[in-house]
Image (cartoon, rainbow, N blue to C red):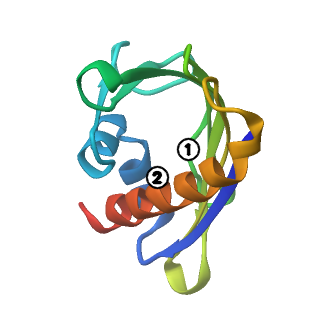
């Protein structure tokens, strides 16, 4: 399994950083060659299902996910969202944590463990570095865009 951890400080209050990071279709706007479709009715909660479709033509695959923990931030506690990846190609989990940071900003942690089934474990370090880069850029864009 490939594992990566992103940490960011965003010049936003925690509730706004949380909103920007957990509006799932927005991820499709900032991750190249990806479209995200939520398949359950709003609002997001435990049990929400969505699919990230990534790639082009016959090289595209679905990455279905389920929200298994949903605790938005409060003034006293950081928010935590855990996603379980349940696809045939990608499995694993992701956790997004958003809490207060210095100077009224937010502290964001994105921790993910994924297994890309067709790839041998020897490539896990490459998958981790690539994912860290791609999702780091995505997090930066999501936190910048209203």
Image height of 11 relative to 96, above or below? below
Instruction: Give the residue displayed 34% in from the left and 24% down from the top.
Output: 60
Please give the residue where the numbered disc 2 appears in the rendered image: 18
Q: Label 2, secondary structure: give it.
A: helix
Quarter assignment of residue 17: bottom left
Residue 111 percent across, percent down from the top left: 67, 51
Instruction: Give the residue displayed 24% in from the left and 60% down from the top.
Output: 146
Please identify the quadrant where the N terminus is shown: top right
Please give the residue where the numbered disc 1 appears in the rendered image: 72
Residue 29 percent across, percent down from the top left: 24, 46
Q: Nearer the viewer, residue 137 or 48?
A: 137
Q: Nearer the viewer, residue 109 or 92?
A: 92
On screen, residue 143 versus residue 28, left or right, reads right
Quarter assignment of residue 144: bottom left
Which disc is residue 84 wearing? none
Residue 67 percent across, percent down from the top left: 56, 25
Quarter assignment of residue 120: top right
**Circles 1 and 2 in contact, beta carbons < 8 Å:** yes
On screen, residue 73 versus residue 93, left or right, reads left
On screen, residue 99 versus residue 48, left or right, reads right
Image height of 111 relative to 102, above or below? above
Residue 96 percent across, percent down from the top left: 59, 48
Instruction: Give the residue displayed 33% in from the left and 63% down from the top.
Output: 141
Q: Label 1, secondary structure: give it.
A: loop
Alpha-carbon neighbours of circle 1 within 10 Å: few (<14), some, or many (≥20)?
A: some
Instruction: Give the residue displayed 48% in from the left and 54% down from the top.
Output: 135
Q: Nearer the viewer, residue 89 or 138?
A: 89
């Amino acid at each position: 399994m490939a594992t990566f951890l992103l940490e960011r400080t965003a010049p936003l209050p925690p509730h706004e950083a949380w909103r920007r990071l957990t509006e799932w279709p927005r991820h499709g706007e900032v991750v190249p060659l990806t479209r995200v479709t939520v398949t359950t009715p709003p609002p997001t909660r435990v049990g929400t299902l969505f699919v990230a479709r990534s790639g082009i033509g016959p090289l595209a695959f679905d990455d279905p996910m389920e929200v298994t923990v949903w605790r938005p931030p409060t003034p006293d506690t950081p928010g935590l969202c855990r996603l379980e990846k349940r696809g045939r190609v990608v499995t694993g989990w992701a956790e997004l944590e958003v809490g207060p940071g210095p100077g009224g900003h937010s502290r964001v942690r994105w921790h993910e463990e994924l297994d890309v089934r067709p790839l041998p474990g020897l490539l896990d370090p490459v998958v981790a570095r690539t994912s860290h880069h791609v999702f780091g850029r995505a997090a930066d864009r999501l936190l910048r865009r209203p």
